[in-house]
Image: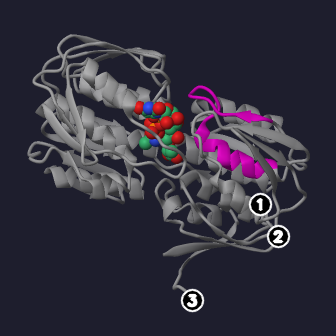
């Protein structure tokens, strides 16, 4: 198992960029199941979750070719023979649930392991199944698996109790083969949804309203293959912005998806960070003292829950009191205990975390618990006094493409080491 070792105190200076967006690639990979032939994805990041999804597609019978240098993945789903997502794969990556919609749409059946809970919350999929039932699917759940069949899906009017990103994506992927029009109301509005809609339109489907809370999808007969460039990862870009802001850095983030980061940029400016557009990118200049501000996470276009942990780290060294409210997941404060081991002053009260800024954090031995918590610990290590060691960084590798190399190139004193158990 690898760990990261960070000596805190260096300012980040230089130019960097975000890789392709993990949460855009996964639904696009699922979309390749909808039509035979070779589909091409470019600007694909080298991430663990994407490797897991490739394993799943290969298990089903897809041919997958990767050119890591060119960041290109070609997927051919002509010979899909297995319509199943086994527990062994789903348990490591819950986004495997995204194969449910396309499998039942094109092959009339699917058997997908129920994703269990996860560190950040129960994360049920009742809304995915509610929508598929309304479209005419028969669903049975036993022995921890979802068995779904549908002779032919039909259009439906579906209202989500609350916006769900992969729920919206799953039903978009199912609706393209349904007879008639499907309307998704109270749909998720994340940029990754818009990207999936663009790909489905390239395949020949009719999709309107993506990016708003009402999406209409009309089945349009056989679909064809598509080629799509993956958008920049707004969460990685946001993490890099905070890395500059928190270290009094001066970093240019090339091709920064600022249009997808409005709430974060607003909050960083409130905290005293200078953010300005330049030729070829967005410059982020950290100023001290960091000013405290309050954060409430909401579905897009609200403040993203995937940036909550990283922003909390910044508030730990701010000059006052910040109240952070996590409205999306019920257990997304796993990073708090680790930050407190570094001297952070944080009190949890239900969905609220009250953060009292301290002058300095102190380096410590830490354990990563989930993807974005890992990123928040790396950020804390960058500004802490002394040495920070972060174990279980396989969590980090699920969603960040060699983050330590990007930070080192900006002047951070950070390295990845292989570990052997001491005791
Ligand atoms: C997606 O997860 C992202 N993952 C998550 O990113 C992100 O945190 C989340 O959206 C919220 O933005 C991918 O896109 C692969 P949801 P998803 O369904 O789709 C409840 C990361 O760090 N809900 O939008 O699983 C659910 O419990 C990951 O990259 C139901 O109750 O999230 C949660 O409280 C972490 N029933 C809320 O909705 C359902 O059927 C939002 O969940 C579905 C969801």
Q: How far apart, in angstroms, are the residues tagged by discs 3 and 1?
A: 25 Å
The answer for how far apart the CA atoms under marks 2 and 1 are is 14 Å
Q: Which residue is mark 3?
A: 423
| Magenta-tinted stretch | 294-315
> In this picture, is 311 found above or below 164?
below
Magenta stretch contains residue 419:
no
Q: Which is more foreground, mark 2 or mark 1?
A: 1
- Residue drawn at the location 46% of the way across and 29% of the way down: 164
- Indicate left or right for 407 with 70 as reference: right
Of residue 297 and residue 15, the one placed in the foreground of this image is 297
Q: Position of residue 407 (x, y in %)?
A: 64, 62
- Mark 2 vs mark 1: which is more N-terminal? 1
Marks 2 and 3, Cα distance to the nearest angstrom? 27 Å
Q: Position of residue 19 (x, y in %)?
A: 49, 49
- The residue labelled by disc 2 is 385
| Residue 231, visible in the rendered structure | no
Please name the residue shown 56% across and 28% down the image: 300
- Residue that badge 1 annotates: 340
Judge from the rendering whether residue 53 lies leftward or rightward of residue 276; answer left or right. left
Q: Position of residue 56 (x, y in %)?
A: 25, 52
The answer, for residue 67, to whether it is visible in the render is: yes
Q: CB of mark 3 within 8 Å of CB of mark 1?
A: no
Disc 2 versus disc 3: nearer the observer: 3
């Amino acid at each position: 198992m690898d760990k990261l070792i960070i000596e805190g105190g260096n300012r980040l200076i230089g130019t960097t960029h975000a890789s392709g967006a993990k949460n855009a690639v996964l639904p696009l990979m699922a979309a390749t199941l909808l039509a035979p032939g070779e589909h091409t994805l470019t600007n694909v990041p080298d991430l663990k979750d994407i490797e897991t999804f490739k394993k799943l597609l290969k298990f089903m019978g897809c041919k997958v070719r990767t050119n890591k240098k060119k960041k290109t993945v070609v997927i051919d789903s002509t010979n899909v023979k297995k319509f199943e997502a086994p527990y062994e794969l789903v348990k490591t990556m819950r986004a495997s649930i995204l194969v449910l919609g396309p499998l039942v749409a094109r092959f009339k059946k699917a058997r997908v392991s129920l994703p269990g809970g996860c560190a950040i919350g129960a994360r049920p999929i009742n809304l995915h199944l509610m929508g598929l039932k309304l479209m005419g699917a028969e669903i049975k759940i036993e022995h921890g698996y979802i068995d779904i069949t549908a002779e032919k899906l039909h259009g439906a009017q579906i209202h989500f109790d609350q916006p769900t990103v992969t729920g919206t994506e799953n039903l978009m992927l199912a609706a393209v083969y349904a007879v008639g029009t499907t309307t998704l109301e109270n749909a998720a509005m994340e940029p990754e949804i818009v990207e999936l809609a663009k790909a489905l339109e390239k395949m020949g489907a009719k999709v309107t309203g993506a990016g708003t809370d009402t999406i209409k999808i009309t089945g349009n007969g056989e679909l064809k293959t598509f080629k799509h460039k993956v958008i920049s990862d707004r969460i990685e870009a946001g993490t890099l912005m905070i890395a500059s802001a928190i270290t009094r850095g001066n970093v240019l983030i090339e091709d920064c998806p600022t249009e997808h980061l409005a709430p974060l940029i607003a909050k960083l400016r409130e905290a005293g960070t200078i953010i300005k557009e330049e030729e070829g990118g967005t410059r982020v200049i950290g100023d001290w003292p960091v000013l405290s501000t309050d954060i409430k996470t909401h579905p897009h276009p609200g403040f993203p829950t995937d940036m909550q942990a990283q922003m909390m780290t910044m508030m730990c060294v701010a000059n006052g009191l910040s109240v952070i409210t996590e409205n999306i997941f019920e257990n997304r404060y796993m990073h708090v205990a680790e930050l407190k081991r570094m001297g952070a002053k944080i009190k949890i009260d239900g969905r609220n975390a009250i953060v009292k800024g301290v002058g300095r954090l102190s380096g410590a031995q830490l354990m990563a618990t989930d993807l974005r918590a890992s990123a928040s610990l790396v950020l804390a290590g960058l500004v802490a006094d002394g040495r920070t060691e972060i174990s279980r960084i396989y969590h980090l590798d699920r969603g960040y493409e060699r983050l330590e190399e990007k930070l080192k190139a900006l002047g951070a004193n950070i390295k990845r080491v292989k570990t052997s158990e001491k005791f």
